[in-house]
Amino acid sequence: MANPMQGRFTWHELMTTDMKAAVKFYTSLFGWTSEEMDMGPGGKYTLLKQGDKQVAGAMAAQQPGVPSSWLTYVGVDDVDAAAKQIAELGGKTLVPPTEVPNIVRFSVAQDPQGAVFGVLKGVGPSANAPPPDDAPLPGNFCWDELHTSDKQAASKFYGKLFGWTGKVGDKDPMEYWHWMHSGKDIGGMMKLQMPNVPPHWLAYLAVANVDTSATRARELGAKVLVEAMEVPGTGRFVVLQDPTGAAFALFKSARM
């Protein structure tokens, strides 16, 4: 059966250099709880939850010297076929197709410009559940944004891989690209703005108040990478770096 989450952002995973510090930070900031799972040879995996809902996962960085980061996953119908296509399109496989029994099959890759992302398909009993259509609640991921050195090349790569289309907003001086899937905006793309920062995906989390949450994040040891600002008609956001070095953003929609 086809994956109903095909082409949609489905999961976020924190690769961190300090699991204890990371869990303390995110549970304090968002009110999440954590649950550690023993993955056998795969080591420990931490589920981050809001109530009874799984929001994200976290695991210790696997390679020395690799900084903490959030990894964005996109759903696919066939992980092995997607990994093959990624290579054909000029990407690179970092983690080959791997199965977590009765839970998920996944792979981690790098696009031709260097941004890292994952693909996955659930194989558990809820793998074919329809995707939620409700607006993300505070403390949930709500947007994913590609920062790249070549927007045109990236649009072709992800368009062929996931079937995404896209557009630039009318009279937008930033020429911000909106990824579209099944006629809906699902994410964004923009040219790299900061020097010496490699291409990457940036994950956004919904909050009730950006400034209040940003202040709390700073109190918990986060750094501000991009000060809070308003995007007229869209919402307010801020980009932060957690105490272990992983970047993420907070967002409050103007429509809520």
Image (cartoon, rainbow, N blue to C red):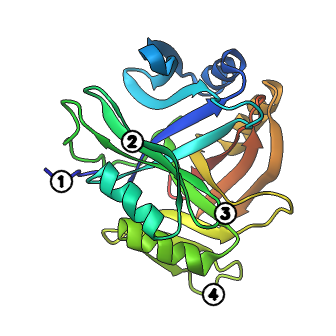
Q: Residues within 10 Å of mark 1 (few under 14, many from 20)?
A: few
Mark found first going from the N terminus, 4 or 1? 1
Return the mark for residue 119: none
Between disc 2 and disc 4, the foreground one is 2
SS for callout 2: strand
Q: CA distance from mark 3 to mark 2?
A: 23 Å
Mark found first going from the N terminus, 1 or 2? 1
Q: Seen in the image, is 174 located left or right of residue 137?
A: right
**Residue at the spot 26% in from the left edge and 54% down from the top edge:** 77
SS for callout 3: strand
Mark found first going from the N terminus, 3 or 4? 3
Between disc 1 and disc 2, the foreground one is 2
Circles 1, 2 touching at the beta carbon (< 8 Å): no
**Residue at the spot 57% in from the left edge and 86% down from the top edge:** 170
Which residue carries the number 1 mark?
2
Mark found first going from the N terminus, 3 or 1? 1
Q: Seen in the image, is 137 located left or right of residue 210?
A: left
What amino acid type is highlighted by mark number 3? Answer: His
Q: Residues within 10 Å of mark 2 (few under 14, many from 20)?
A: many
Return the mark for residue 171: 4
Between disc 3 and disc 4, the foreground one is 3
Where does the image place residue 250, in percent across and percent down from the top left?
64, 45
Q: CA distance from mark 4 to mark 1?
A: 38 Å
Q: CA distance from mark 3 to mark 4?
A: 20 Å
What amino acid type is highlighted by mark number 2? Answer: Phe
